[in-house]
Image (cartoon, helix red, strand yellow):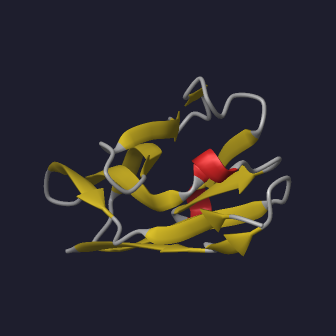
Amino acid sequence: QVNLVESGGGLVQPGGSLRLSCAASGNIVSISAMEWYRQAAGNLRELVAGITNGGSTNYGASVKGRFTISRDNAKNTMYLEMNTLKPEDTGVYYCKAEVLTTHWGDYWGQGTQVTVSS
């Protein structure tokens, strides 16, 4: 059993910043790729950023240069630093991790709401 718990969401004004966290717990042997997704109302879930266990990163075009993904492998935790937030960044942010327990599997968190509004 693996649990992913996101935190750090909230309401912020345009131009502001937020830092999201995703903590993984359970019967974890190893974590490979970790990713942040978001889903705005009425839209499909989209990839925001991803990071390998070696630290290689990739970003969606709409957030490149504004968001920074990182992880602490010792704590099984991933972060998303979001700067210069725009109203179009509003949505539910989910973390996803590829986790080895007795076998490899993909796990999702429950999501955290981010609202960018004045």
Looking at the image, which residue sits at the far top?
A: 61
Give the image quarter of residue 72: bottom right
Residue 36 picture location, percent across and down: 48, 48
Q: Nearer the viewer, residue 58 or 67?
A: 67
* Residue found at x 71% / y 42%: 67
* Residue found at x 48% / y 71%: 112
Residue 38 picture location, percent across and down: 44, 50
Residue 93 picture location, percent across and down: 47, 59
Q: Is residue 47 found left or right of 12 in the rendered image? A: left
Classify the position of the N terminus by image quarter. Answer: bottom left
Q: Nearer the viewer, residue 9 or 26?
A: 9
Residue 106 picture location, percent across and down: 23, 50
Does 53 appear above or below 17?
above
Give the image quarter of residue 41: bottom left
Does 110 appear above or below 19?
below
* Residue found at x 30% / y 53%: 99
Q: Is residue 69 found left or right of 38 in the rendered image? A: right
Classify the position of the C terminus by image quarter. Answer: bottom right
Q: Is residue 118 found left or right of 10 in the rendered image? A: right
* Residue found at x 61% / y 72%: 9
Looking at the image, which residue sits at the far front?
A: 118
Task: Please give the count of numbered marks on the rendered protein.
Answer: 0
Q: Nearer the viewer, residue 116 or 36?
A: 116
Q: Is residue 12 found left or right of 34 in the rendered image? A: right
